[in-house]
Amino acid sequence: MTDQSTSEATSPAPSPAATASARAGTAAGAGVSRRRLLGTAGATGLVLGAAGAGLGYTAAPAGATPLTSLGADRAMFHGKHQPGITDALQARGHLVAFDLAPGAGRKEAAALLRRWSASAERLMAGEPTAHDDTDVARDAGPSALTVTFGFGHSFFDRTDLRRQRPGALDPLPDFSSDRLDKARSNGDLWVQIGANDALVAFHALRALQKDAGGAARVRWQMNGFNRSPGATARPMTARNLMGQIDGTRNPKPDDPDFDQRLFVPANGDPAWMAKGSYVVVRRIRMLLDDWEKLSLPQQENVIGRRKSDGAPLGGSTESTAMDLEKTGKDGTYVVPVNAHARITRPDQNGGAAMLRRPFSYHDGFDADGAPDAGLLFICWQADPLRGFVPVQRKLDRGDALSAYIRHEASGLFAVPGGAAKGEYVGQRLLEG
């Protein structure tokens, strides 16, 4: 966890005509548009309940409203960078790592990435997969779905591409606070799925898992969530499960060095990583029972920001610059020296910065009733040795938050640049 995050955002609602034209497709065996019953989920949608019809459902009323902006929002698969990096936070996410099957190598990996890319392009457009679609997302629009692919350190051994493995993909160093489960860490291939509808996200997860066929098998999979777009009166920085506004100082696209911090330059090394990025993924458990025993002032001192509005201690608003030298009447710093927000500031870490795009998670309760919940930490940078590593090393030496969190899984993946039309993700590596 660091003091950086993206703000929620939604796209303007499209006109009815634009909505209708965007929803092409025909339901199998019927002359009804595949996306005809758009926007009927929720208040006007198909509702499961005891009062429903014979099958337990209430039919959508006549004249149901068209697809809302939430469902109509669409991200583009093809582009300079892969989707799911700079897009706004989504309400639902799935992270999944695959290992190539025994005997599978470069040829099988290339065929798999070709299948995955074709499916991702269709799914992000709100279309069914080309073969054996499950119809899980039949009535929904794209819902801002993004699918992102990356390669782990071991991938290059499995495909005999060791000479193409980037130096930036060297394994992360050990940190004293790590309690890592190796079975839920790393992997040959990594896929990130995000959407503003849970069924759309699951549909993509299931489709890509089926596409893997005999070429790859799931190593681990994690599910996450965020606040839904439009749930607040205005766009706001996200809160985490500790109730804190989490990550005010994320790099912004209008920062002059935004691309430099996030993306490998066009002439970067290796060439196949041009315009790509590196992602660090950490499953960080929050020890909520311990955290919630703290008083509000104690919680705010641990973070260094007010819980109500995210303002730095001693500041007026969330965007107020943190005054690290300000002292109180007793002569102590207003923002404690071990406060999380102080330690993670880029100007306290040689300018190290990364774009955080996390999901919260909750995986039930332990036998003693403690929640297995926390943060699926996802951060993007042009080089993890200049982004994540120096910040985490400093946190490891004295972050007040460390007593209330536990790093339980970790992964580092090289995420190549976006695929051009007609290409698949990773083609320059696998066919270069």
Image (tube, rainbow, N blue to C red):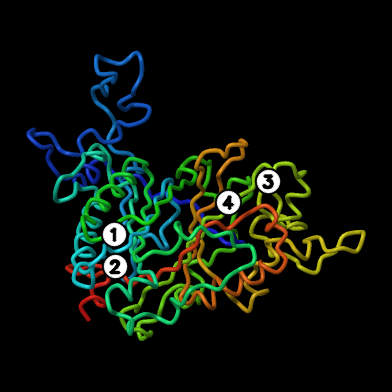
Q: Secondary structure at mark 3?
A: loop
Q: Secondary structure at mark 2?
A: loop
Looking at the picture, how far across and down is residue 361, in whole percent? 50, 46
- Against 203, is 264 above or below? below
Residues at marks 2 and 1 touching, judged by CB atoms closer than 8 Å:
yes
Residue drawn 50% across the image and 74% down it: 384
Relative to 270, 236 lies left or right: right
Q: CA distance from mark 3 to mark 1?
A: 36 Å
Q: Amino acid at mark 1?
A: Met
Residue drawn 80% across the image and 69% down it: 325
Residue assigned mark 4: 285
Residue assigned mark 3: 308
- Report the quarter where the C terminus lies: bottom left
Q: Amino acid at mark 2?
A: Gly
Dot 3 or dot 2, earlier in sequence: 2
The residue mark sitting in front, 4 or 2, is 4
Q: Amino acid at mark 3?
A: Ser
Looking at the picture, how far across and down is residue 173, in whole percent? 55, 73
Q: Name the disc covering residue 76, or none.
A: 1
Q: CA distance from mark 1 to mark 4?
A: 33 Å
